[in-house]
Image (cartoon, rainbow, N blue to C red):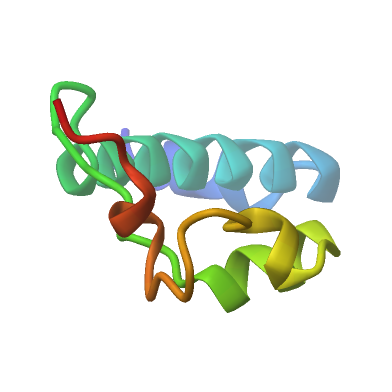
Amino acid sequence: MAVLAATRVQNADPADKIVRHAGILFEYLQARRQQMYPLNARRSLRNFMIHEVSRLASTPESTLYPTMGRARSLSALKPTH
């Protein structure tokens, strides 16, 4: 029986073989993603420096902290209660 199955696989249309292998690869990658990045994982962003935000937003640094002086990171701009 195994010989018959192996013969069918060898004689299969190349397009069918590509589709079958793509499905196997997709399932493997999905399982790997679930393992590495579970949906219930908690992540936080790092604090960005003012010059990084300025560059990314194409905004002069002076507009990002007009009253705060020379803050080193955005965490320094958070209001304190």
Residue at (48% x, 47% y) in the render: 25
Please give left or right for residue 69 compared with residue 30 in the image.
right
Image point (63%, 57%), residue name: 66
Q: Quadrant of residue 33?
A: top left
Position of residue 11 in the picture relative to residue 32 (left or right): right
Q: Residue at x 18, y 32 (%)?
A: 38
Q: Which quarter of the figure has residue 44? A: top left
Give coordinates of residue 14: x percent, y percent.
Answer: 81, 50
Residue 14 or residue 78, whichever sits in front: 78
Where is the N terminus found, in terms of image quarters?
A: top left
Quarter assignment of residue 16: top right
Nearest the viewer among 13 and 79 is: 79
Q: In front: 16, or 51?
A: 51
Residue 40, percent from left and from top: 14, 22
The number of numbered discs placed on residues in the rendered structure image is 0
Percent x, y of residue 48: 43, 64
Camera-side residue of 60 and 5 = 60
Q: Quadrant of the C terminus?
A: top left
Measured from the top left, where is residue 60 in percent x and y?
80, 69
Q: Considering only vertical position in the picture, is 49 above or below 3?
A: below
